[in-house]
Amino acid sequence: MVINMNTKDTPKFLRWFNFFSYFIFSSPILVLFFNSVLDNYALSMTIYAAQSISCSLLEIPFGIISDRIGRKNIMVLGAITRLLCFIIWAMSYSFGPLLLGAIIGGASDALASGNNDALLYDSLCDTRQKKSYHRIYARITSDYQFALFMGSLIG
């Protein structure tokens, strides 16, 4: 699957993509949900730890894959795995499925981690706007932080 997008539109697309990727209503209550399934807060927090560990382990391999199959395709794969993570969590009834969802969520984080930044940098280089990278990157980052805040507030 190849996604076509005009290079000059990439920064605007990334702003909206990141905003909606992080506009998550359940963020403030996920640990409460995990605890309602597991009845143990310490075990519930291991779900977050597993997600962070899987992200750390997968970042370099996914960076190599991103270079080979394309950054835009990796973005789509990252969004699909994030959705799959939440679907698995919603259907979970024990530690195993929650852990699987966390590992898939970590994979989603690893897919987006450096890939989206590299896509932005590459597109700005292509349009001879490389000097604007830090300003645009900061705006994109603040947008997704705002999305986290709004999603949490509404949730």
Image (cartoon, grey):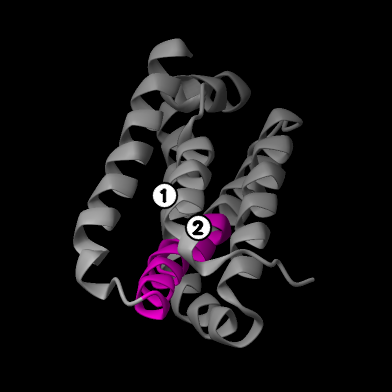
Is any part of residue 40 visible from this angle? Answer: no
Q: Position of residue 113 (x, y in %)?
A: 42, 62
Residue at 46% over, 45% down: 18
Disc 2 is placed on an element classified as: helix
Disc 1 is placed on an element classified as: helix
Residue at 34% over, 24% down: 149
Give the amino acid type for the residue marked by disc 1 in the picture.
Ala
Residue at 45% over, 72% down: 59
Taking the view exactly as shown, the residue that stands out farthest to the right is 1
Residue at 66% over, 58% down: 76
First to last magenta residue range: 107-127
Name the mark on residue 102.
none
Q: Position of residue 46 (x, y in %)?
A: 45, 44
Q: Quadrant of residue 96?
A: top right
Q: Which residue is mark 2?
A: 9
Q: Position of residue 40 (x, y in %)?
A: 48, 26
The quarter in which the N terminus is drawn is bottom right
How many residues crowd around disc 1 within 10 Å: few (fewer than 14), some, or many (20 or more)? some
Depth order, front residue of 138/31: 138
Is any part of residue 132 visible from this angle? Answer: yes
Depth order, front residue of 23/31: 23
Give the amino acid type for the residue marked by disc 2 in the picture.
Asp
Does label 2 or label 1 sit earlier along the sequence?
Answer: 2
Q: Position of residue 34 (x, y in %)?
A: 55, 28
Residue 135 position (above or below residue 68): above
